[in-house]
Image: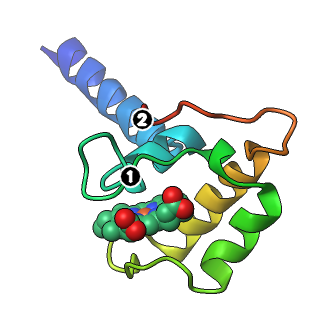
Amino acid sequence: MKRSIMFLVASVALIAAGQARASEPDLFVAKCGACHKRGGQAPAINPADKAGRVWGKYFRRGRHPVDLSSSISEDELATIIQYLKDHAADSDQPAAAVIPK
Ligand code: HEC
């Protein structure tokens, strides 16, 4: 009995640690893909859709047509923008199919 409780505590701790460190592509798919997916309310998007400097300016200049502040924190948005730039069309590792079109 005691052993299974220990196991349960350890498992929950591992799951919590995993969630705290959600990977960048997962964050992009979860937060942006909520709308930008095939069949979603907005067209599917991927990092390689734009050049790095375009991604850099896009949110800074408030170009996004929908206010995302209630669903995406500033930290999360900064992480996603860095991910988009790192895998933009003109990057070393463009990512074209993270969200299937
Ligand atoms: C609440 C839904 C929603 C979320 C979440 C969302 N968007 Fe959008 N986005 C839209 C809508 C609606 C449009 C306008 C689509 C159109 O013009 O047909 C749009 C437009 C865009 C465009 C311009 C269209 C294009 O292909 O150039 C980009 C780029 C974009 N979003 C990026 C993002 C990124 C990056 C995220 C995540 C940080 C995100 N969006 C999260 C709804 C959303």
Residue 72 is drawn in which quadrant? bottom left
Query: Could you tell me the amino acid type at mark 1?
Result: Pro
Query: Could you tell me the amino acid type at mark 2?
Result: Lys
| Figure quadrant, ligand 1 | bottom left
Write down the residue under mark 1: 43
Q: Is mark 1 within 8 Å of ligand 1?
A: yes
Q: Which mark is residue 85?
A: none
Q: Is label 2 in a helix, a strand or a loop?
A: loop
Q: CA distance from mark 2 to mark 1?
A: 8 Å
Quadrant of image for the N terminus? top left
Residue 52 is drawn in which quadrant? bottom right
Q: Is mark 2 within 8 Å of ligand 1?
A: no
Q: Tell me, yes or no, if residue 23 can be seen here.
A: no
Quadrant of image for the C terminus? top left
Q: Is label 1 in a helix, a strand or a loop?
A: loop
Q: Tell me, yes or no, if residue 8 can be seen here.
A: yes
Q: Position of residue 86 (x, y in %)?
A: 77, 47
Residue visible at 36% across and 26% down?
Answer: 10
Image height check: is 6 above or below 69? above
Image height check: is 81 above or below 5? below
Image height check: is 80 above or below 58? above
- The answer to whether the residue labelled 2 contacts the one labelled 1, judged by CB atoms less than 8 Å apart, is yes
Residue visible at 31% across and 52% down?
Answer: 34
